[in-house]
């Protein structure tokens, strides 16, 4: 993030691709920022959007150096932005079908975005208009996660999985999934799950899903996991279509979850449904809370009201 006390505030806008409504809003937002923000702003858009509006384009990853990134689209667009911009504040404008993560309606954005820009510049305490969301990191077990996590020992000691290739995934705002060759009949694997070195479950399943509270309303819910209020500091571990499975488990956000796929030809570890890595079982994955959270600014969605969107 740039120094917000500098003379200008740098704002990035990412618009859902191929969405003319989003492009119109980009142009209107730039005018609103020029006219209404109590501070000088620079505005840049993502490179795809720059082909449709007359605003300079930059790679989304470059917006990590900006003061604010506005995501215009659905949950998928906001997840995409969160993958790229680190802790830079994100304000989500909802043009999507569900819009669980984007609290601002397009009709309100022209007032709210200049206000938030002015507040960021004044270094105002945004109070309830700032929320920090935990993300999850997946690493090869034994390789040492970013929190120094290692494979569990003792009662749940892993079978020797041999040298594991090094890989990294973007941290997940919703969930990390580890699954067998494919979902559904004949596609699962024998998978063991340990929490802080103690075995929680073992057996045949399509996969294992580790969710943040944010992700509890997404894939986690479809797999029978619980709803978790955003203020609860937890991780949720859910077996996917397990034979003789255990109920989902809610653990402390500081827990280390180790997932071992034992007997499949291949397996996959996937962050927020998009960023994926192929595994060669036997293989173990460690899931921990990432050191870098996502910051959402602006009016936040009301959890209980938003539940209506799931019906
Ligand atoms: N069976 C399922 O429910 C299922 C399957 C695959 C992926 N997903 C979810 O989709 C996410 C990826 O999103 P995408 O847009 O790139 O793929 P996508 O386009 O397939 O979106 C899937 C749906 O999940 C909704 N969604 C995403 N995050 C949410 C959240 N935190 N709370 C409530 N709803 C949410 C989106 O609005 C969309 O309707 C993954 O992180 C996963 O949670 C769900
Ligand atoms: N401006 C963009 N540049 C590059 N990729 C984009 C852009 N906008 C969206 N995407 C890609 O599209 C994906 C999600 O957008 P998509 O339109 O599929 O869903 P959404 O935002 O959740 O909306 P909806 O709720 O309508 O499905 C992102 O993960 C990203 O890969």
Image (spheres, helix red, strand yellow):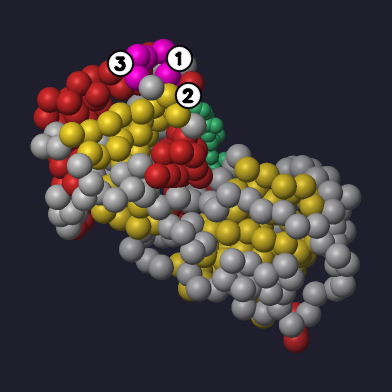
From the viewer's side, name the closer residue of 39 and 193. Answer: 39
Which structural element holds mark 2?
helix
User: Magenta stretch: residue 15 in it?
Assistant: no
Which structural element holds mark 1?
loop
Q: Mark 1 near mark 2, Cβ–Cβ under 8 Å?
A: yes
Query: Is residue 124 shown to the viewer in this render?
Result: yes
Residue in view at x 75 percent, y 57 percent:
166
Check disc 1: other Cα within 10 Å, few if <14, some if 14-19, many if 20+: few
Task: Report if the beta carbon of the residue with label 2 is closer than 8 angstroms to ligand 2.
Answer: yes
Residue in view at x 48 percent, y 21 percent:
48
Q: Position of residue 240 (x, y in %)?
A: 66, 54
Q: Which mark is residue 24?
A: 3
Q: Which mark is residue 71?
A: none
Q: Which residue is tagged 1?
A: 51
Q: CA distance from mark 1 to mark 3?
A: 13 Å
Range covered by the magenta-colored residues: 49-55
Q: Which residue is tagged 2?
A: 47
Check disc 3: other Cα within 10 Å, few if <14, some if 14-19, many if 20+: few
Question: In this rendering, would 97 be left or right of 172?
Answer: left
């Amino acid at each position: 993030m740039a120094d917000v006390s500098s003379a200008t505030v740098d704002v990035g806008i990412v618009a859902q691709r191929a969405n003319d409504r989003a492009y119109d809003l980009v142009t209107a937002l730039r005018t609103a920022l020029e006219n209404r923000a109590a501070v000088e702003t620079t505005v840049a858009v993502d490179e795809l959007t720059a082909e449709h509006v007359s605003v300079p384009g930059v790679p989304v990853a470059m917006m990590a150096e900006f003061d604010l990134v506005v995501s215009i689209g659905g949950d998928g667009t906001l997840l995409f932005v969160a993958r790229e911009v680190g802790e830079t504040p994100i304000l989500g404008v909802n043009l999507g079908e569900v819009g669980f993560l984007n609290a601002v309606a397009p009709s309100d954005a022209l007032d709210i975005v200049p206000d938030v820009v002015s507040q960021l510049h004044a270094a105002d305490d945004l109070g309830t208009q700032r929320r920090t969301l935990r993300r999850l990191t997946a690493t090869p077990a034994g390789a040492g996660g970013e929190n120094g996590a290692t494979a569990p020992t003792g009662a749940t000691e892993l079978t020797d999985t041999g040298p594991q290739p090094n890989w990294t995934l973007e941290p997940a705002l919703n969930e990390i999934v580890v699954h067998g060759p494919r979902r559904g009949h004949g596609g699962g694997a024998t998978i063991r799950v340990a929490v802080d070195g103690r075995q929680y479950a073992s057996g045949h399943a399509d996969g294992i899903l580790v969710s943040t509270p944010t992700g509890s309303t997404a894939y986690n819910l479809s797999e029978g996991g619980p709803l978790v209020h955003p203020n609860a500091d937890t991780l949720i571990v859910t077996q996917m279509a397990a034979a003789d499975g255990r109920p989902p488990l809610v653990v402390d956000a500081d827990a280390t979850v180790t997932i071992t796929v034992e007997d499949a030809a291949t397996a996959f570890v996937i962050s927020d449904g998009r960023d994926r890595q192929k595994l060669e079982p036997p293989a173990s994955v460690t899931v921990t809370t990432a050191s870098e959270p996502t910051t959402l600014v602006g009016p936040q969605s009301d959890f209980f009201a938003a539940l209506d969107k799931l019906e």
